[in-house]
Image (cartoon, helix red, strand yellow):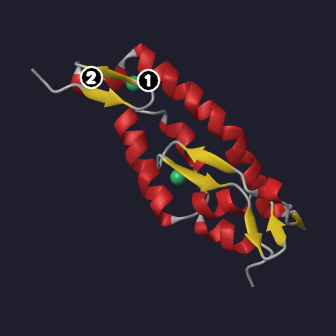
Amino acid sequence: MAPALRCPLCRQSFFSGRGHVYSRKHQRQLRTALERLLPQVEAARKAIRTAQVERYSPEHDQCCWCLCCGCEVQKHLSHGNMTVLHGGLLEHLASPDHRKATNKFWWENKADVLLKEKFLVSQHDYTRGLPIRK
Ligand SMILES: [Zn+2]
Ligand SMILES: [Zn+2]
């Protein structure tokens, strides 16, 4: 018998092994999870152009959960007493590690290929956009 597979998306163990990711249940969980992350990613992407810098406040210490990497990511980027809104997530999305993890995540979860680009920011777009990077 195949060992049980613990699925972090469904938060359950399954004995169907790799077949599980094809199941309706898993695909539905996957879609919900991606839909939860997407607005944050889109806000970050928008911030490339309309970078908003605010005076730092403890409210800016927020994290969001990157599904692809399975880790917490600082949402905003603080430098001294300034905060670039969404800068932290944006930096994360543009990182090679995130790209690698996203490719793996998409492959492992059989996610919709057409959606993948939405969760990635190219280094090119990123370096062009941020105001605090000269
Ligand atoms: Zn699952
Ligand atoms: Zn990530």
22 shown above or below 132: above
In terms of secondary structure, where does tag 2 sit? helix
Describe residue 116's horizontal placement relative to residue 21 as left or right. right
Residue 30 placed where, x, y %? 50, 28
Disc 1 crowd rating (10 Å Cα; few below 14, some 14-19, many 20+) is some
Residue drawn 87% across the image and 62% down it: 52
- Whereabouts is ligand 1, in terms of quadrant? top left
Q: Nearer the viewer, residue 39 or 116?
A: 39
Say which of marks 1 and 2 sits in front. 1
Mark 2 belongs to which amino acid?
Gly
Describe residue 27's horizontal placement relative to residue 121 as left or right. left
Residue 50 placed where, x, y %? 86, 61
Q: Is label 1 within 8 A of ligand 1 (CB to nearest ligand atom)?
A: yes
Residue drawn 54% across the image and 38% down it: 114
Q: Kindly report the distance in space between the C-alpha atoms of the residues bearing marks 1 and 2.
A: 14 Å
Residue at the outermost front position:
58
Numbered mark located on residue 133 in the image = none
Residue 129 placed where, x, y %? 76, 69
Residue at the outermost top position:
24
Numbered mark located on residue 10 in the image = 1
Q: Of label 1 and label 2, which has the lower sequence position?
A: 1
Residue drawn 46% across the image and 62% down it: 97
Task: Tell me where residue 85 sits by quadrant.
Answer: bottom right
**Mark 2 sits on what residue?**
19
Mark 1 belongs to which amino acid?
Cys
Residue at the outermost bottom position:
134
Dots 1, 2 in contact, CB < 8 A: no
Describe residue 122's horizontal placement relative to residue 60 as left or right. left
